[in-house]
Image (spheres, rainbow, N blue to C red):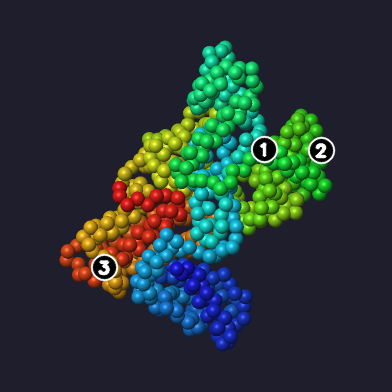
Amino acid sequence: MKLLPLEHRVLIEKAIQAAQAAGDLPAFEMPTIEIRPPKQAAQGDYACAVAMALAKPTGKNPLDIANAIANHIQKPDFVSAVEVVKPGFINFRLNESWLQQQVEAIITEGDRVFQLDTFKGKRAQVEFVSANPTGPLHVGRSRGAMVGDTIARILEAAGYTVEREYYFNNAGVQMTNLGNSLRIRYLEALGLPVEVPASDNTTFYQGEYLKDFARDLVAEQGNSLVEADWQPFKEYAEKRMFGIIKQTLARVNVSHDVFFNENSLYDDGSVTHTAEVLEKAGYIYRSAASQNPGENQPGEHDEENAGKGVATWFRSTALGDAKDRVLIKSDGNPTYSLPDIAYHINKLNRGFDLLVNILGADHNAQYKVVQYGVEALGFDPSIIHVIIIQLVKMVRNGKEVKMSTRRGDYDTLDDLIDQTSADVVRYMLLARSPDSHLNFDLDLAVKQSNENPVYYIHNAHVRCAGIAREAAKQGITDDGADLGKLGAAELRFLRKALELGDVIDSSAHELAPHRIAFYAHELATVFHPIYDEVRALQPDIDPATQKARLRFYRAAQVIFKRVLTLMGMSAPERM
């Protein structure tokens, strides 16, 4: 399948070169050429405004430049006309006969329609979710899961070989707190006297799930752990919770190829080695206070040692940071930054061409420190691309529902799936740019009507499947269809369907998975009126037209299934 904007861009570039060779245009550096649909459909299918950008370097009128370019365009089979209009636009019209034949091309490519080779031979890693196993996944944590998985799917569609990774963060104070929290619940379940911390205690996890774990632990171990410290409780809770997290992700069609254990970075000496190499490179100093304190950025958590003793500092200001950062606190424990730098060195050493990290909004400053660390160690930080996921608000009846893993008063992702569906959850967490705040409207999510965008998109695929099913029941086939019988309405949908390749391409280049969600809804919006207008199984339709329309709906079903699959959603045939 052709990427039509790219094809038209090549036509313009070649025409400019030919015009220059013929002396119709002077020499100049090839500009950036953008190809877009015109604002009005009557003006054609694609438009180029490059002539306006060339007025200054050529000293010519844009209309004259556009005519000079158009005169050298060699029309391919998919272009029926090239038109120049004031003040200097070059408009293209697709050949309708060629457009009709794209039905066969779509059907032939099937589930791999618009499978691109743009990044063929390259390897990408997408690290996403990576939630600490301290509680079930809730909607706030889950947005990154949908964004990361969809990015992985888009990168695969663009030609990358993709590895999905979960950074299993099972070290640090939050895991100690989890172990201590379960220990308290375990003693409570045994009926032993124990003081349960108040709900505002920031080191105690309040969730009901720990009570369930405690009861199960009593059933398995009895009172054998009464004298134990937090460690066995941490290990038990970690194993149980991580199993729950994986099961939950599977419900929304998310899986990972690699689960990277943070502890392995300590076990193999990577964390220590990273600090040593940074020190040898001159980026480490020890002090009770920063030599370059700077100021916190908005939303940044201050990890300074604050006079607690001599700490190990990373001289990140030498690389452009606003302030130096603590790598090892005065108590000897590393901050998040040091193991994260070691982790990214590990990833870079695995030979990926692209690393994509999906992180929460609270990591906005931290990831930059990691990039400075990578650069200080002689690696190329430009390979690392970070997508910051903004916050999600759960809304019921127009009111926000507060969420907190530690307090335990939140809706889990499992709750949301049970109340709506996996597809609804995936789409609604994907349908806004990741850098925008998102309100998850539960009232809208449960609606079984076209107000719900998931229902609207699903229904398009269901309608195509229903036509095919009824045709088979009546013994009608689309074999030997004359696609020349397709009319303007069907061609309108095909024009939109052929945008999918460019949507995949631009989404992969810009790591913008929400574009697929936008496109899916736009495609359904074009389709539904056509379905009402273009009937395929009415008894008064002549057989040749009927076959062509059945073939058209078969192709439409292929496109909708591909789009739904790219979003990790199902393609139902009945509703």
Instruction: From the image, state whether disc 3 or disc 2 is nearer to you.
Output: 3
* Residues packed near mark 2 inside 10 Å, few (<14), some (14 to 19) or many (20 plus): some
Residue 316: horizontal and vertical position, in percent? 74, 46
Mark pair 3, 2: CA separation: 78 Å
Mark pair 1, 3: CA separation: 62 Å
Q: Residue furthest left?
A: 540
* Residues packed near mark 3 inside 10 Å, few (<14), some (14 to 19) or many (20 plus): many
Asked which secondary structure carries label 2, the reply is strand
Q: Amino acid at mark 1?
A: Asn
Residue 504: horizontal and vertical position, in percent? 49, 60
Residue labelled with disc 1: 263
The answer to whether any part of residue 214 appears in the image is no
Which residue is at the front of the view, 509 or 546? 546
Q: Amino acid at mark 3?
A: Lys
Q: Amino acid at mark 2?
A: Arg
Which residue is at the front of the view, 25 or 171? 171
The answer to whether any part of residue 215 appears in the image is yes
Instruction: From the image, state whether disc 1 or disc 2 is nearer to you.
Output: 1
Mark pair 1, 2: CA separation: 25 Å
Residue 178: horizontal and vertical position, in percent? 59, 28
Labels 1 and 2: the sequence-earlier one: 1
Q: Residue at x 56, y 29 (%)?
A: 237
Q: Residue at x 38, y 60 (%)?
A: 558
Residue labelled with disc 2: 286
Residue labelled with disc 3: 547
Labels 3 and 2: the sequence-earlier one: 2
Q: Quadrant of the N terminus?
A: bottom left
Instruction: Answer above or below: position of 481 versus 431.
Output: below
Q: Residue at x 81, y 36 (%)?
A: 287
**Left or right, 308 with reference to 43:** right
